[in-house]
Image (cartoon, coloured by chain):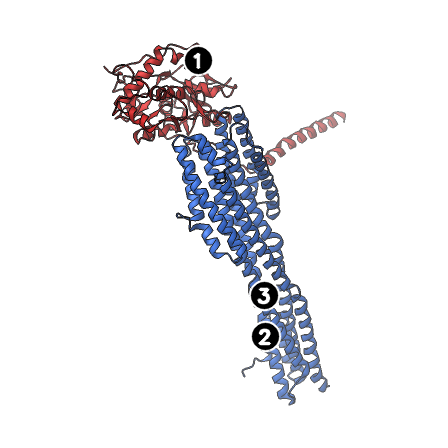
Amino acid sequence: MALLSPTRTAARTPTGRGAVLATRLTTRTGSTPGRLTVLMLAVAALAIAAGLAAVIGLAHRSSEVDSIITRSGPLTLDAQELYRSLSDADAIAASAFLSNGQEPAALRQRYESDIAAASAALTDATAGDPGQRAVQEIAAQLPVYTGLVETARTYNRQNLPVGAAYLREASALMRNDLLVAAERLYDAETARFESSVGAASGFPWLAAGLAVLTLAGLGYAQVYLTRRTNRLLNLGLVGATAMGLAALIWLGASWLGVRGELHGAQRDGSDQIQLLAQARIDALQARADEALTLVARGNGASFDTDYGTMLTDLIGKDGDGGLLHRAAAGATDPAVRAAVNAGTGAAKSWKSTHQRVHGADAAGDYSAAVELTIGDSPTSAANTFNKLDKDLATGIAATSAQLDAHARSAAGALTAAPIGLAALTLLLLVGVVTGFQQRLAEYR
Amino acid sequence: MRRKLLAAAAVSVLALVAGCTSTTGPHAAAAPAFRAPVPAGVTDPAQVPSAAAAADNSCDALASLRPKGPLPTPGHMPAGTPMAAIFQRGHLTVGVDQNTYLFGYRDAVSGQVVGFDIDIAKLIAKAIFGDDSPKVVKLVAITSAQRIPFIQNGTVDIVSDSMTINCERKQQVQFSTDYFDAGQKILVNKGSPYHTIDDLAGKKVCSAAGTTSIINIATRPSHPIPVSVNDWTDCLVMLQQGQVQAVSTDDSILAGLAAQDPTVEVVGPRFTDEPHGLAIKKSSTPFVEFVNGVLDRARADGTWARLYDKWLGGPAPAPPAAKYSD
């Protein structure tokens, strides 16, 4: 058994002062009691360092998990809600414009609640990081957007075609500036969430390394004492070793528990939320494209092309691929899978209705195209889109609940650990001091 | 002593004033600036199509094909003609603008596209079907730039969209006789210092992409900066938002924009002549002759004047005279 000399053991502790002290003591006192004292101090110093590293590491980990539950998780959802409400406002404003002159009260209310939701989500996002340029940009441009929509509405009520031009300008502002900024915000919040998960599930190298060194020190001390005194067991040191092992196991178990829960939060939660959120955003943009194709008539080709891109992104070219397919394949919760499958059905039926809208518009049958787009029939684009949006919202709510449950279990796994590890460290120190004092007393 | 006090007071007041003015500067500059909204599809400065083509005077642009005999009875189109094919199909497909107020625009109350150009197209449908209801007239909204390709690929049978007859376009499509005489003018804010296109040297002037108007702006000796958009109404938005100093195109279109905003006006002399014709596929010679017959009848029986009064306000001038190549 190759053992470290006490001096070298001491020199490896991160506490430089302890190392210096140990060196001084060994050189001054070449005697056995002197060596024993040095050994005791070195082991105690290691144990204290290990305990501190473990407790501080756990506190840090715990605060990262808390930040997932209270900040980065909700902020990611807020950023997603901000994007959704802005995109929905764009789609609804365009749909409302298709109704002749007087827009339906229900669409007006939905537009207004979208703007209110966007403002509320923006206020929450400001709590995350108010200095972000994306937040400032949305705060600055949202009133400009609503101003343009109101101008469009006023002109439309007077039956003047410049109203449609204002609506197109509003939509361009929404798509080219506001939604781009909201996407940046969402990406930033997602990155923050991922980094919290990474920080909270990292292996506690420092604490574990120090704990192993403490155990090695204890082992050496016991071998040394056995050789010097011919007594096989020192109860104090044996107890201390047991405490050290227990602490190391607890540390490892808490790490595994938190890591498992956080990986579960990613697998059952955030990974799927990202897919579903992207799907919902694509669906909203496609809905706005559909309405704008008819508002912009003549200049609608680019909107129609964009609609096609969005739907391919959603359900693939043949209806059995894309984001929804991936979300269904990756869903771990049957409720989520059912919601996604229902959404896929709605998206397919929407796509086929849209082809009829496109056909009617291309043939110059504008009224039929509008009726198919915003009408009340069960297969109208409005109804199939609303169904898809609702299914995706259900899926997102269910996965959010999964994420939250996992994150809370992770937090639960951490509550007792700091107290337990601190207590074990104290008991270990008591064992070390008792064990060494017993021997030192024999020299007096 | 007293004088000194007064002087000191005066100095401190001055310092205060100076302090106030200097502190407002940096504070105002602290707010981050974001891009002002612009219409979708704006190009500033505009991509101007070849000016040489527009100035092409190699042909007699206004000369069209003379109708062969009287118009056939509605519902009885001569066999083998494009009109017979249209009758068989059951509807006439017309390429129109839905953003040109008074000429072709969507009525927000009825949801239908209406205007002078639309009513002219309906005359053609009435002569084919004896009917001009939406059932037989399919109005397809297109942009200025889509007019020629849509005629060439058969997406539409005819374009009725304030389209200027010129030699370059005549190489790609056929035109009916001149059914409306317009000329390019400018639209500015009331009380602006700009009275003609030549006052706009170095200023931004808006027009729709793919039109003769944008070439006319770019080739003016005063060198205004042409800015192109997708639709005429986008130009009005830019003028209202102060992003351009003027809009320039046919006075008929400008009148439609001016009718939507009492604070703008059409000013200056016409600096171009813009005769409007209906565009038809190059190979559809019998259809061109038929359309010219319909237009001749509308000029003669007062229908043209009635439509002018209805959309543009009377008294109607004499309709533009038909000119034929033979």
Residue B181, picture quadrant: top left
Depth order, front residue of B228/B21:
B228
Q: In the displayed structure, does residue A419 sit left or right of residue A309?
A: right
Label 1 environment density (alpha carbons within 10 Å; few <14, some 14–19, many ≥20): some
Query: Which part of the image, by quadrant, shows the C terminus of chain A?
Result: bottom right
Q: Which chain is blue?
A: A
Give the residue type at disc 3: Gly
* Viewer-nearest of discs 2 and 3: 3
Tell me which chain appears red.
Answer: B
Instruction: Output the chain of dot 2.
Output: A
Callout 3: SS: helix
Q: Is residue A39 left or right of residue A180?
A: right
Which of the 4 quarters of the picture holds residue B151?
Answer: top left
Are marks 2 and 3 in one subunit?
yes
A382 shown above or below A241: above
Find the residue positioned furthest to the left.
B326
Residue B112 shows which numbered tag?
A: none
| SS at badge 2 | helix
Q: CA distance from mark 2 to mark 1?
A: 101 Å
Judged from the image, the secondary structure of the residue bearing numbered disc 1 is helix
Tag 2 residue? A213
Quadrant (top left/top right/bottom left/bottom right) for the N terminus of chain A: bottom right
Q: Residue sitting at 45 percent across and 22 percent down?
A: B101
Residue ID for mark 1: B309
Name above or below for residue A411 compared with residue A131: below
In contact (CB < 8 Å): disc 2 and disc 1: no
Give the Cα distance between marks 3 and 1: 83 Å
- Residue neighbourhood size for the residue with mark 2, other residues' Cα within 10 Å, grouped as few (<14), some (14–19), many (≥20): some
A174, above or below B177, in the image: below
State the residue position of label 3: A257
**Around disc 3, counting alpha carbons within 10 Å, would you say few (fewer than 14), some (14 to 19), or many (20 or more)?**
some
Residue B123 placement (x, y as % from top left): 37, 19
